[in-house]
Amino acid sequence: MATELDAIDRQILSELTRDGRMSVTAVAEAAHISRANAYARITRLTQEGVIQRFSAIIDPEKSGLRASAYVTLNVRQDSWRELRQQLTMIPEVQHIALVGGEFDVLLLVRATDNADLRRIVFSVLQPIAGVISTRTLLIFDDVDAR
């Protein structure tokens, strides 16, 4: 069930999306509410799962991950649950989406270089039970739209 969000909740989410390390006081100032109100709202949004976690956004190239690709998978329809669990265990897989269309799963994969990316696709992803085929789309430029 979706949580009802008002304009202040949306402002808080916008501020925290821009800077997850922002203090509660700074969030309160930006949303024009008291610190206690901001703290209570952030706590509620976290408890209700609207805010799933706080994390750092790492520059892939500066952290040594110079090859990035979207890898699409066609999979056996009865394999999603097991496949999902296995994919979450692969450190180079940074995002997993079950989608509709020409393929079934879309992965964001980050690797140290093209040879490492090739290893991940051919030696890690393709041998997984349930994977029928893969297609790799190299990322030439990565832009964060936020």
Image: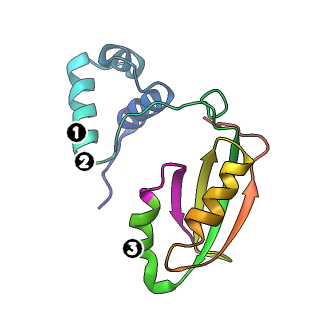
Quadrant in which the C terminus is drawn = top right
Q: Amino acid at mark 3?
A: Glu
Query: Does dot 1 land on a helix, a strand or a loop?
Result: helix
Which region of the structure is painted magenta? 88-99
Quadrant in which the N terminus is drawn = bottom left
Decide which of 48, 138 is in the foreground and name it. 138
Query: Does dot 2 land on a helix, a strand or a loop?
Result: loop
- Residue 141 x/y as whole percent: 77, 40
Q: Earlier in the sequence, mark 3 or mark 2?
A: 2
Q: Are the residues flagged by discs 2 and 1 in contact, CB closer than 8 Å?
A: yes
Q: CA distance from mark 3 to mark 2?
A: 27 Å
| Residue 44: numbered disc | 1
Q: Nearer the viewer, mark 3 or mark 2?
A: 3
| Residue 48: numbered disc | 2
Q: Residue at x 43, y 57 (%)?
A: 88
Query: Does dot 3 land on a helix, a strand or a loop?
Result: helix
Disc 3: which residue: 82
